[in-house]
Amino acid sequence: MKLDRFLIFIFLASLSFIPLSEMILENKVVDSADMFHRVPLDKWADEYTSKIDDMPQWYPHLFGGMPSYGGFIYAPSDPFRKVFDYLKLNWGIRYWFHFIIASMGMFYYLKWKKFRDISSIFGSISFSISPYLFGLINAGHPAKLYAIAFIPFSVLLAEKIIYNRSYKAMLGLTVLLALQLWTKHVQIVYYTWMLILFIWFWHEGKLAIGKKFNLKFFVNRTILLAVSIIFSCLLVSDPYLPIYEFHGHSTRGTNSSLEENTNLKKGASWEYATQWSLHPKETISFLYPYFYGLQNFPTRNVKSQAYWGYMPFTQSTHYMGLVVIVLGIIGFIIKHNNSKRISMGVASFIILLIGFGHYFPLFYWPLYKFAPLFSSFRIPSMIYILLPFTFSILAANCLNDLINYMDTNKFNIVQKPIIYVLLSLTGLSLFLLLFGPDILSFSKLGEMSKYQPSIIDQLSNQRKEVFQKGALLAFFLSSGMLASIWLAFKKIITTRLIGFIIIGLTLFDLWIVNNEFINPKSERILRSGYKVTEEVKFLNENKGNYRVIPLEQFNSNRYAYFGISSVGGYRPVKLRSYQDLIDSQAFIYSGIQDMLNVKYLITNRNLSKNHYKLVFNGKTKIYENLSVLPKAWFVKSTLSVNSMHNSIREIINADFDPKELAVVLNYKSKEKLSIGSVELIEYSENKIILQSQSDGPGFLVLSENYYGPGWNATIDNVETKIFRTNHVLRGINVPSGNHTIVFSFNDSIYNFAKSLSFFSILFIISLGLILYFDKIKIAKNFFIRKK
């Protein structure tokens, strides 16, 4: 038996190794925008940690500076990542490791459900190599893939608590939940627990209906699940305390100040949160992945721009495999009186409706409005990451039943529903293959005005081509299943063979679709986008404590790669106040450029000679901002405002002059201000030192993003208050005379989080050892029912 399990492990591991082999063996990477934008951040972190022992808390090169540790830029707290980094393992091995966790987790979950080996292998394949996971590699979202990989083991341990009230399962779930949280993709963890809570409530409801509800057992289950959550939260205090601190000031945690009503619910706005809702029409893509073109990846080729659905764009698919969908639906139909199977069917239906987002907000709106933290998430369709799990259970159940019915000569029980479903699907696939290209438009809203007619024709032809490929694939699979089931019904093939055929068809199906997403290239090609160009050489020769604004490449991290700070960049989460500047298009105003320390503008256009001087003229032009302000300066006067809305309203106009006036939030002082001088002594990630001189009291503005929880300021070692100034910057009162001013990052939360995580890990290890040696009989007898 051990040998059998070992062979199953090798087989399942090899299924993900094959598509990742070039990444694993040749150190290749997938050319995705997110991975490309990640390169400068990783380079900065490597350079910093190789020279300095402390943890960089602030990243200075994007968006005028933002939190590093709390802002998801560099927070190496994940134990697996630390091991991977220490061993210098490539991306391919990291992905493969998590694919193995996903496959083995699903296999053991199904075995715990008493499924046959062949059905458990099929379910494991269905979940662990579902196309969405390879789409995540394609899009450059490793954290999301890592978090998904832990779902089967997490649900398995949670169900052991729900059904058996297992104390050891509680400890295991604590560790699994912590590992999942350490991937830093909270949304996936949240969805995992939505499913766990559904399973739990379903179980309690079933007990109540059957008049078997036991209050003591309910309390035991509740305590075990709650303790598991609490312990796991303690384990992941590092990095989640700094992350939670940042969250309240981020685009995900608070609303825009551009809206006058500041009493809105904390979280992302409805419009922002419901982007990438799945239109109900696109559910046909669960059967025909190429129906709406599969993906659009415009930096590659026309084939990768084939998507014409209702989302802004997509680089993945929620297709789970036609065989999986069909068996899942049939499995639900033929066992309509099985409570656990009904629960997975109902869960799948609710998940589907939630993913419709703003198109059908029956479930999404109440969750957005009332569920804790839910409004912080976006992309409603992301919840479909749970469907490969629920459908793998349903489909494996169906295969298990088919084999059981064949072995007991009861195949006639399922013959009709299977034959009817497969005949209908085969007929529909043939119809779409023959007539689909003539009856569908293959055009996306807005494309006619965006592209030339020749490009439209190219896109249309490509979409028709992939559409027919999908219809042909569906026809082959459905007819292949139909023929196999018919042969099994006639007893021409054996039960073991039908299992192998189902697995073979699934592998063929998933291999075809997954292959669309894996296009690995040499890592050198990825880094070639950061080659030193003539304008970079110019900027490096004129380095200083200033920022640049790339007008046509505002959302690029390119210049950060060379240590050149930009007011733009790409990050999925930013400080909310800075996002307000971006949303209000404030960068067109010279005053905003001046206060943000923008010395150079990089552009292909010609700019006004009144404000800018052309200093480099090559393939790209560089203009010097003639009125740029230094890193810190004194102002002549201040204007106090009582809200963030009023703050941004005062600065986004052409008459605002930050050299003369500072707009300060809740500033009470009415002192007459003196203009002094200030010199930058030190500028680093965790500390900024200034030397000031003035004949009277003054107000100093520092051109660095305001982040209340993060920074302290001292004047001659005496702490002073930092005021939010000009909506995004920092300001302090400075007395007359010569002073040393120090802005230092307050890392007390970070240090507390590390200590709390460390002692929690020691506690969990100690508890695990105690349980292993079976030393706590009293607690065990209380929580575990004797069999």
Image: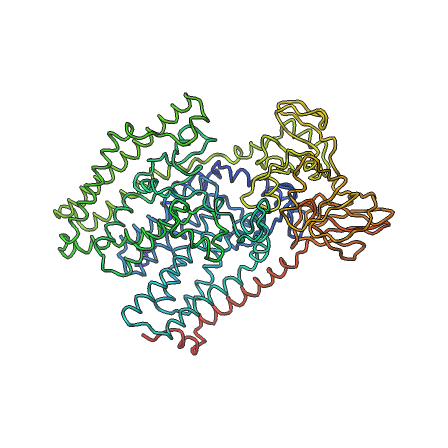
Identify whether 279 is placed above or below 341. above
Residue under the image location 51 percent in, 46 percent down: 89
Occupied quadrant, residue 6: bottom left
Quadrant of the drawing holding the C terminus: bottom left
Q: Position of residue 681 (x, y in %)?
A: 78, 45
Occupied quadrant, residue 776: bottom left
Q: Can residue 666 be seen in this view?
A: yes
Q: Where is residue 779 in the image (x, y as percent from the top left)?
A: 44, 76
Quadrant of the drawing holding the N terminus: bottom left
Q: Which of 240 and 210 is in front in this view?
A: 210
Q: Is residue 7 visible?
A: no
Q: Nearer the viewer, residue 254 or 667?
A: 667
Q: Which residue lies furthest to the top in this view?
A: 454
Q: Position of residue 244 (x, y in %)?
A: 56, 56
Q: Residue furthest bottom?
A: 778
Q: How many labels does the image show?
A: 0
Image check: 446 left or right of 107?
A: right
Residue under the image location 62 percent in, 49 percent down: 67
Q: Position of residue 682 (x, y in %)?
A: 75, 45
Q: Nearer the viewer, residue 246 or 90?
A: 246
Residue under the image location 83 percent in, 46 percent down: 674
